[in-house]
Image (spheres, grey):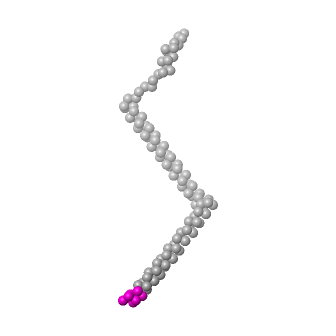
Amino acid sequence: MDKPTPERTKETEVREPRKLNMEEKRKLEKLLIADIDSATKRYDAVTTEERHALIERLKRTPAAEAKALYERHKLARKQQEELAKKLDADQADTQSLFGSLAKDLERLVG
């Protein structure tokens, strides 16, 4: 029987990996890119499906917090519209007031 010598043991332990040539590197790169592309497509399909399912579930039974936030949003929109109308009315009143003040000033000066 052959007894492993310390030199043979070192040789087997410190074996360096074979280096790839350019053609092998290109093939490996193409394989990796193809794997990444297919994994990305599968992930996109799964997440899109899950997202649609979640949206449908939330439409049917929205969470209480989301419902409350939506109600606050609707109230804020309504208040915004009312204040915009009031501001427009106030601006019209101010313009008519300035118009009448200008006429009064012209009569006094002129």
Residue nearest the viewer, comparing 79 with 3: 79
User: Residue 3's quadrant in the figure?
Assistant: top right
Relative to 105, does residue 1 appear above or below in the rendering? above
User: Residue 109's quadrant in the figure?
Assistant: bottom left
Where residue 76 appears, as percent x and y from the top left, is 55, 68
Picture quarter with the N terminus: top right
Relative to 97, does residue 12 appear above or below in the rendering? above
Write down the region rendered in magenta.
Answer: 103-110
Query: Residue 107 magenta-drawn?
Result: yes
User: Residue 78's quadrant in the figure?
Assistant: bottom right
User: What secondary structure do most residues of the magenta stretch adopt?
Assistant: helix
Q: Residue at the spot x=61%, y=63% of the render?
A: 68
Where residue 16 appears, as percent x and y from the top left, is 45, 23
Q: Is residue 60 visible?
A: no
Where residue 106 appears, as percent x and y from the top left, is 38, 87
Q: Residue at the spot x=55%, y=52% of the render?
A: 50
